[in-house]
Image (tube, grey):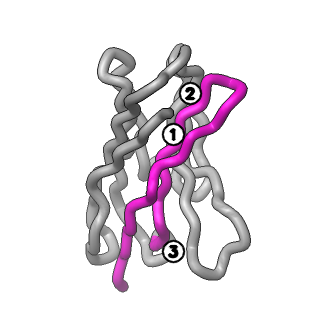
Amino acid sequence: QVQLLESGGGSVEAGGSLNLSCVASGSLKSINAMGWHRQTPEAQKRELVATMTTGGSTQYRESVKGRFTISRDNVKNTVYLQMTSLKPEDTAVYYCLETDGLRIHWGQGTQVTVSS
């Protein structure tokens, strides 16, 4: 089994910053990408926030470009998300993910709340 342990998150006022981290452990095969999705209570499904391949290619949701930065430590199987200039619409449960290209594993999620 693969376990993803998230940390960080919390509550912050609009304009503030938060940092998330996620460590993957267990029966890991060759990790292809790690990243973050998020989901609000109203949403039907999770939406991509940012992902990063082992080769360093990144993908960001348009609304977070310039404010969020994803990074990885491939040796530690860890992915980070630096979030700045946070907005109330960033409020959601943030889920870490890891994929080897065939399977996707998810973390339990961590709450991020941004107040106006």
Percent x, y of residue 101: 68, 24
Residue, disc 3: 89
Range of the magenta residues?
91-116
Establish if 115 lies above or below 107. below
Percent x, y of residue 92: 48, 70
> Is there CB contact under 8 Å for labels 2 and 1?
yes
Quarter location, residue 43: bottom right
Instruction: State which mark lies toward you, 3 or 1.
Output: 1
Q: Label 2 is placed on what type of residue?
A: Ala
> Is there CB contact under 8 Å for labels 2 and 3?
no
95 part of magenta stretch: yes
Quarter location, residue 9: bottom left
Residue, disc 1: 35
Residue, disc 2: 33
> Is there CB contact under 8 Å for labels 3 and 1?
no
Percent x, y of residue 80: 35, 39
Q: Identify the residue at image location x=32%, y=44%.
A: 21
User: Seen in the image, is 21 located left or right of residue 87?
Assistant: left
User: Most extreme residue toward the bottom, as rendered?
Assistant: 116
The Cα atoms of the two marked residues, 2 and 3, are separated by 26 Å
User: Seen in the image, is 1 located left or right of residue 10?
Assistant: right
Q: Label 3 is placed on what type of residue?
A: Glu
The Cα atoms of the two marked residues, 2 and 1, are separated by 7 Å
Which sits in the foreground, 58 or 42?
A: 42
